Image (cartoon, rainbow, N blue to C red):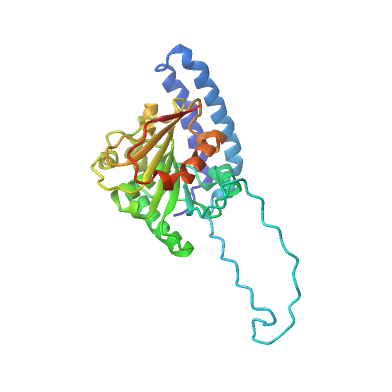
Amino acid sequence: MQALPFLSAPLLLARLLAAPLQYARRLPTRTSPLLLRSTVVDLAVLAAHLLLYPTGMSQERPAPPPAAEPPDGLRTDGRLTSKVPQPAVAAPTLLPTEGRAHPPVLLLHGFIDNRSVFVLLRRSLHRHGWCHVEALNYSPLTCDLRKAAELLGRHVAEVCARTGHRRVDIVGHSLGGLIARYYVQRLGGDAHVRTLVTLGTPHSGTRIAPLMSAHPIVRQMRPDSEVIAELSLPAPNCRTRFVAFWSEADQVMIPATTARIDHPDVIADNVHVAGVGHLALPVNATVAAGIRTALASAEEAEGEGAADTISVA
């Protein structure tokens, strides 16, 4: 997986600016203020994100494990020496998640983006007790969502081997959520992914930006694509729990409900967040709180049937 070029970012701006014009004819007049507000917020988020974009262009390097400290009185060359006591360093203050041993969390960005979109979400997870959080980049040269899902599978296997955890949790924004879902449902990833959280992901396909369909990955996000058809096939005994955040103000999902998961074979919670635009989903505080709740409660939720839709004001 590689970083996206910075020059791709203006395409995201063009897509966002074109969206309100496309939806204005479809939405009732009374919803226009909500659409306008979410669009303004999305533009503000985009402006801030463009400043951060260069910081996320390179692939993240996993933090090395802490070096083992030699026994008292023994140097690394085997010679005896006196060890000078070191002052104790206070552990960082964490907000309560009561010290649970969470599995690693992998963050997967959307189309024309990179890992910098998750700066605030990562900080929120760290502050509430998630110690192992990694953000991935995938290459825009990948022309098949299936290939991206295969690469994700290799990375999941590497993270499990490196951390000693049997399973991971994944949070995917937009296309990132669709890549992760394909890995889980079609490539056996349910054996390695405990919870998959998606943010504004076109689970049933989106009709946004037909002019951008020249890109093969964009075509695979269309409602009539082979990938969307594959994801609707039976997925018996799928072990991963899905949590899909969606908003009626998401201007990239057409219709907005395409960001919900409706599959008889998967355990899925569809979480409605009111008035949050597509780009704001990864940085919204309410969404971050919902993600933490979903991840923390994953163990209790395992084995339960698909839950009813819940709504976050």
Residue at 33 percent of width and 49 percent of height: 239
Residue at 27 percent of width and 48 percent of height: 237
Position above or below: 229 against 184: above
Quarter of the picture containing the N terminus is bottom left
Residue 109: in sight, yes or no? no
- Quarter of image, res 74: bottom right
Rendering coords of residue 174 (x, y %)? 43, 39
Q: Single out the residue that lies furthest toward the top.
A: 29
Number of residue marks: 0
Rendering coords of residue 244 (x, y %)? 41, 37
Position above or below: 52 against 164: above
Q: Single out the residue that lies furthest toward the bottom.
A: 79
Comparing 192 with 213, the one in front is: 192
Comparing 197 with 17, the one in front is: 197
Comparing 286 with 177, the one in front is: 286
Position above or below: 45 against 77: above
131 vs 229, left or right, is: right
Comparing 102 with 58, the one in front is: 102
Rendering coords of residue 157 (x, y %)? 40, 60
145 vs 290, left or right, is: left
